[in-house]
Image: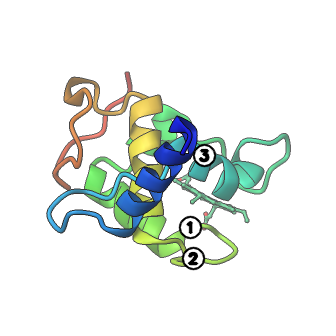
Amino acid sequence: MTARLTGLVVAAATACTPAADAPDTSVDGEWAYTVRCSFCHDVPNGIGAELDAVTLASYTTVGELDRYLRVAMPHEAPGTLADAEYDAILRYMIGSRRLVPEAGDAWPLPDSTRLQTP
Ligand code: HEC
């Protein structure tokens, strides 16, 4: 079996059997955000606002932003994404906008963690 194929098999096996106490990191947050969110939020005249650091930090904590996304987004089908997708998208947005600069790669972050503008 080629190394590439072996990698795919390992990735698939890992995706199917996440350790019970570890966060599910099998979803690529940037990819999920691009597929699920960008067509409304990152295009000219999109129906959703630009999701810059100031807009996202206005949710004040990780928990509040997480709750909003799970209840309200994606706008056309709220609450329909897999748990791991919401989690990966949240993580990607917090990381890419540097909303919790001191956290580094730490994940998950406690709900009470304050969001800041960099
Ligand atoms: C079909 C278009 C559409 C999609 C897809 C979509 N959104 Fe939205 N989004 C909206 C609209 C419209 C609003 C404004 C909602 C309102 O004010 O009730 C919004 C609001 C938001 C807000 C609040 C912005 C603010 O000004 O407070 C956030 C955060 C957000 N979306 C994130 C996401 C994320 C993350 C995804 C992907 C999981 C997503 N959205 C997918 C249309 C969309």
- Image height of 85 relative to 81, above or below: above
Q: Quadrant of residue 56?
A: top left
- Image height of 51 relative to 17, above or below: above
* Mark 2 Cβ and ligand 1 under 8 Å apart: no
| Residue 18 image offset from top left, x and y in percent | 28, 64
Tell me whether the residue at label 2 lies in contact with that at label 1, contact meaning CB atoms closer than 8 angstroms. yes
State the SS at label 2: loop
Question: Which badge, 1 or 3, comes first in the chain's sequence?
Answer: 3
| Residue 92 image offset from top left, x and y in percent | 45, 41
Name the disc covering residue 31, or none: 3
Name the disc covering residue 73, or none: 1
Query: What residue lies at 39% left-to-right and 39% top-to-bottom?
Result: 94
State the SS at label 3: helix
Q: Nearer the viewer, residue 61 or 5?
A: 5
Viewport quadrant of the N terminus: top right
Question: Which badge, 2 or 3, comes first in the chain's sequence?
Answer: 3
Q: CA distance from mark 1 to mark 3?
A: 16 Å
Viewport quadrant of the C terminus: top left
* Mark 1 Cβ and ligand 1 under 8 Å apart: yes
Q: Pointer 2: what residue? A: 78
- Image height of 115 relative to 110, above or below: above
Report the mark closest to the observer, 1 or 3: 3
| Residue 77 image offset from top left, x and y in percent | 64, 78
Q: Nearer the viewer, residue 8 or 85?
A: 8
